[in-house]
Image (cartoon, coloured by chain):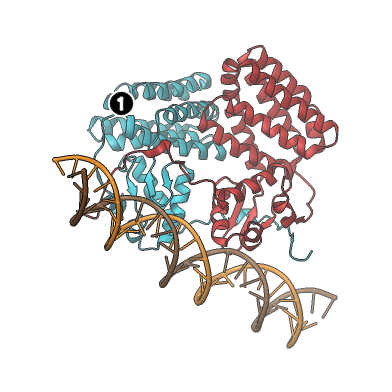
Chain colours: A cyan, B red, C brown, D orange
Amino acid sequence: MGKTAEKIVEPKRSLRPRIKSDDVESAICERIRAAVSAGDLPPGTKLPEETIAESFATKRFFVRAAFQRLAFENLVDLQKNRGAFVAWPGVKEARDVFEARRAIERVTTEIVTRTILTYQIGVLWRQVRDQELNWNRGNRKLAISGISGFHLSLAALAHNEALTAALEQLILRTSLILGVYGTPRAFATMPEQYRLLMELIESGQSLLAARQIERCLFVLEAELDFYPPPRRDVDLKRIIETVG
Amino acid sequence: MGKTAEKIVEPKRSLRPRIKSDDVESAICERIRAAVSAGDLPPGTKLPEETIAESFATKRFFVRAAFQRLAFENLVDLQKNRGAFVAWPGVKEARDVFEARRAIERVTTEIVTRTILTYQIGVLWRQVRDQELNWNRGNRKLAISGISGFHLSLAALAHNEALTAALEQLILRTSLILGVYGTPRAFATMPEQYRLLMELIESGQSLLAARQIERCLFVLEAELDFYPPPRRDVDLKRIIETVG
DNA sequence: TCATCGCAGATTGTTAACAATCATGGAAAT
DNA sequence: ATTTCCATGATTGTTAACAATCTGCGATGA
């Protein structure tokens, strides 16, 4: 039984990351995630392997690996023999994502409200106010991706990697959903909602804060328009190669 | 701008799966997931590409793709130039996973309790009783993976793909956690807990049912032993090639 | 005896060539 | 004018060979 018995190795976990990082593959993923988050990559956009490979001065091999990761995250639609496309979430998927976000953020917000430190409250407040400014100045894409950043920062304070990782994916999918079904008016009453949320967190009312972040998500979902107009083409190369 | 402008394609979503399926890659993933769920693949086991490739009569190419998926699900630890290993969850990760499961299953259970149909209650009851039988007959591995199946069946009735997918991964990670830190006594009082859960679901008490499934998870987590003895070697080929 | 070094052998990482499939555009027919 | 069909180019899927790295073992020396 020489070849078939596999040894247990000692867990050198602390030294190496679970997935190899600091490589081109991750860079591609990050770039595409950023573009999705910013609303620059509309759902349905085709992502040709060769184009992306040239943009990163690398080979198709690594682009394919990146696409697979993004497909796991439901950001990219891999179609056999046809290639990779930015995912186009359906109505049911949109509702599922919002419901899942409420389930997770409710919990993280409750935890965070009970454990947050004073200086961290300041950081969150600044994020909220910055996005309000961005919005009022007409910089709407920036404001939207900024709010995603706020949700992520908030959740990260719960110090639970499983919840944070799941939420990160859901937030990116939300960006796609907003790209398809979002309306300008969806954000009209949001600043008020977020300020209220921050006040509840600041005063330590964890249950009310949990309810309030649910409310934020409810309000956003309620303003979606499920009969959106068709969308225009996109200059993929410019988007991918533009340094943020 | 002939080459750089990418077209938006119409969403043929309903026809094709988001990731190509019915292929060797998925088969490999399923097989390894099943082995992990059954507790047959202890954390730390090395998974050589060539060995798996031979078992499935395929090439390394597809095995690597499968490993990437499993790494994404935190079931496999990909180490550069060293290969793939069954993931070895740490203590913090274990606690995070349980907390995340409570957050998700609390919600799904509440939804299910309000929407479940009569015949579906029967199916769940049978699952609970079957695992109780398995346990009492000494078929413990089967009982444990059966309970995982129960949690999954229950959550699936909430009809939320985002939550179900996230939970599926968390449940598999729980199998790994039990493999490392699990103790025999962890399941002593479980049958009683699950019967109580089913009674609450049956009587439509959604809030209490939600609390009860949290309790199930609390009880399980509380009985973990974070100073486990070292574990023995494993015959990988036998496990992978054995038809369940 | 023990530790260190270095050399195969084994395993994984990467590449480029080839095969398979699809998309585009034009010719022919109705 | 419209539709159908086919050829051709473009894109993706797969393979096998090669390069890089690690692991284990034995030789060497203290």
Q: Give the quarter of the image for residue A15.
A: bottom right
Task: Indicate whether A242 appears above or below B93.
Answer: below
* Position of residue D7 in the picture relative to residue A110 (left or right): left
* Position of residue A39 in the picture relative to residue A210 (left or right): left
Q: In this rendering, does residue A160 appear at all?
A: no
Image x and y of residue B57, in percent: 62, 59
Q: Residue at x 29, y 23 (%)?
A: A188
Residue labelled with disc 1? A227
* Position of residue A189 in the picture relative to residue C3 (left or right): left
Image x and y of residue A109, in percent: 50, 28
Question: Identity of the amino acid at label 1?
Answer: Tyr
Element type at mark 1? loop
B25 and B42: which one is in front?
A: B25
Q: Residue at x 33, y 41 (%)?
A: A44
Task: Indicate whether B23 appears above or below A154.
Answer: below
Q: Chain of mark 1?
A: A
Q: In this rendering, does residue B208 appear at all?
A: yes
Image x and y of residue B27, in percent: 60, 49
A82 and A135: which one is in front?
A: A82
